[in-house]
Image: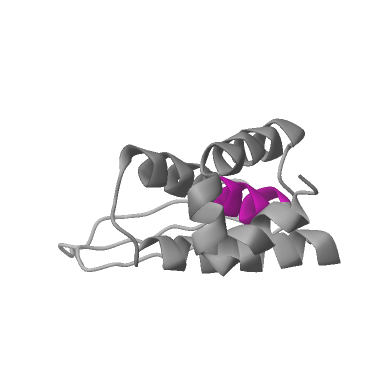
C-alpha cells in the first residue's frame, strides 16, 4: 500500500530538541530559562526599564539615543546573564555623567545613577 506521505526517521536522542514535520508543522522551543538575578540586579533592571520609558518622553538627541542604546544593552545583558558586566556599568556611568542635565530632569535617571554608585 503506497502513500504520498514522506518517511521520517530519527536516530539518537532528541532531548532538548525542537522539530516539526509536515507542510503545516510548527515548532516552538521553550528550553531556556532566564538567568537568576540578585536583588541589586533586579533593582537596576527595574530602574533601567523606567528610564528607557522616560526617555521616550523627552526630545530625542544623539545623547538620548546613545543613552537608550546603552540602557537597552544593559537590560538585555541582565536578562540574559543575571548581572551587567563591569564594562557595561562603566559605559552607562559615563553616559549618565555626560547627560547631567538629563539626569537632573528625569527622576528615573537619578535612580539608575544612584544604583550605579556614581
**Which quadrant of the view contains residue 59?**
bottom left
Where does residue 12 sit, x and y in percent of width and height?
A: 62, 46
Would you place residue 82 above or below residue 39 in this image?
A: above
Q: Quadrant of the N terminus?
A: bottom left
Would you place residue 11 above or below residue 7 in this image?
A: above
What is the magenta range? 74-81
Is 52 covered by the magenta stretch?
Answer: no
| Residue at figure coordinates x 44%, y 49% from the top left | 68
Where does residue 109 sit, x and y in percent of width and height?
A: 58, 59
Closer-to-camera residue (33/113): 113
Would you place residue 117 above or below residue 93 in this image?
A: below
Q: In this view, does 116 lie to the left or right of 38?
A: left
Is 76 covered by the magenta stretch?
Answer: yes
Where does residue 88 sit, x and y in percent of width and height?
A: 65, 36
Q: Main secondary structure of the magenta part?
A: helix
Q: Quadrant of the C terminus?
A: top right
| Residue at figure coordinates x 34%, y 67% from the top left | 57
Where does residue 63 sit, x and y in percent of width and height?
A: 40, 40
**Which quadrant of the view contains residue 61?**
top left
Closer-to-camera residue (86/83): 86
Is residue 109 in view from this perspective?
Answer: yes
Q: In this view, does 71 lie to the left or right of 80?
A: left
Closer-to-camera residue (97/10): 97
| Residue at figure coordinates x 25%, y 56% from the top left | 6
**Which quadrant of the view contains residue 28?**
bottom left
Q: Residue furthest top?
A: 87
| Residue at figure coordinates x 66%, y 40% from the top left | 93
Q: Is residue 5 left or right of residue 16?
A: left
Would you place residue 50 above or below residue 112 in this image?
A: below
Is residue 33 in view from this perspective?
Answer: no
Q: In this view, does 68 lie to the left or right of 40?
A: left
Amino acid at each position: 500500500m503506497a502513500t504520498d506521505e514522506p518517511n521520517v526517521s530519527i536516530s539518537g536522542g532528541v532531548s532538548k530538541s525542537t522539530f516539526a514535520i509536515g507542510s503545516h508543522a510548527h515548532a516552538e522551543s521553550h528550553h531556556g530559562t532566564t538567568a537568576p538575578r540578585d536583588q541589586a540586579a533586579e533593582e537596576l533592571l527595574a530602574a533601567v526599564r523606567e528610564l528607557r520609558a522616560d526617555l521616550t518622553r523627552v526630545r530625542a538627541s544623539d545623547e538620548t539615543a546613545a543613552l537608550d542604546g546603552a540602557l537597552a544593552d544593559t537590560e538585555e545583558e541582565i536578562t540574559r546573564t543575571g548581572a551587567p558586566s563591569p564594562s557595561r556599568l562603566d559605559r552607562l556611568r559615563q553616559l549618565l555623567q555626560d547627560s547631567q542635565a538629563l539626569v537632573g530632569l528625569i527622576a528615573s535617571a537619578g535612580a539608575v545613577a544612584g544604583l550605579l554608585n556614581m
